[in-house]
Image: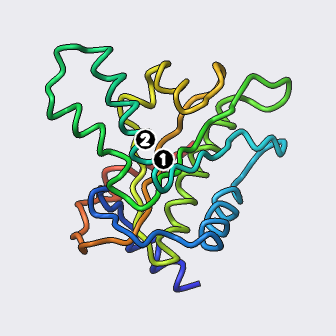
Amino acid sequence: MNETLDLLGSRRSVPANALAEPGPSTDELDRMLTLAARVPDHGKLAPWRFILIEGEARAALGARLAALLKELDPGVAEGRVQQQANAFSQSALVVAVVSCAAPHVKIPEWEQVLSVGAVCMNLSVAANALGYGAQWVTGWAAYEPRALEILGLKPNEKLAGFIHIGTPTERLPDRPRPALSEIVTRWSA
């Protein structure tokens, strides 16, 4: 168990532009996704799914979203368009985590959303445990209906985030974390 605690104590996001090849093998990726899906899931609804963005598809998605960004905002800076074009090619692999949370007669939708968030965190931790770095990001494309169409989301689905995964090219220092005294209270009667 100390390995688990050490992993949780040292886990940190690695920026996508610092996540190079090689990415996980097929077996490693299958293991990561299997572990990601081992989360609390009231009612066994599995209110999530994964979209793998790998290989040449990374650049193709970046190009399509860059064109959409330019169409939506003709005055957008060319540097921002180029940044979007390269956004998915920076890391070895991108996993889009899709939320399929929906109203249910018994299971609150909020619990389903929390389960999807847990999937994202498990995926990040699993990547770290296998020696890779990961970054969970959203960005404008996670909220733009036309971008979500490009990704293949259904109208009732939302994007929980893009999880960038790859081999870290640098070791970054940890960021400041909140002191427990700032975030913990004790309830009393």
Q: Residue furthest bottom?
A: 2
Query: Where residue 73 is drawn, which disc sits there?
Result: none
Q: How many marks?
A: 2
Residue at (48, 47) in percent of width and height: 57
Q: Is residue 37 above or below residue 116?
A: below
- How busy is the neighbourhood of tag 1: few (under 14 within 10 Å), some, or many (20 plus)? some
Q: Nearer the viewer, residue 113 or 171?
A: 171
| 100 relative to 104 in the view: left or right | left
| 134 relative to 155 in the view: left or right | left
- How busy is the neighbourhood of tag 2: few (under 14 within 10 Å), some, or many (20 plus)? some
Residue at (79, 32) in percent of width and height: 107
| 5 relative to 178 in the view: left or right | right
Q: Where does the image place residue 103, in percent across and percent down from the top left?
A: 75, 22
Q: Nearer the viewer, residue 94 or 158?
A: 94
Q: Is residue 1 above or below residue 26?
A: below
Secondary structure category for the residue under label 2: helix
Residue at (68, 41) in percent of width and height: 48
Q: Where does the image place residue 161, in percent across and percent down from the top left?
A: 48, 41
Q: Where does the image place residue 128, in percent across and percent down from the top left?
A: 47, 71
Quadrant in the picture for the C terminus = top right
- Are the residues at dot 1 and dot 2 in contact (C-beta closer than 8 Å)? yes
Quadrant in the picture for the N terminus = bottom right
Measure the C-alpha gap from mark 1 to mark 2.
5 Å
Q: Amino acid at mark 2?
A: Ala
Residue at (41, 30) in percent of width and height: 141
Residue receiving disc 1: 57
Q: Is residue 121 above or below residue 27?
A: above
Secondary structure category for the residue under label 1: helix
Q: Nearer the viewer, residue 158 or 57?
A: 57
Query: Where residue 60 is drawn, which disc sits there?
Result: 2
Q: Where does the image place residue 84, in percent across and percent down from the top left?
A: 29, 37
Q: Amino acid at mark 1?
A: Ala
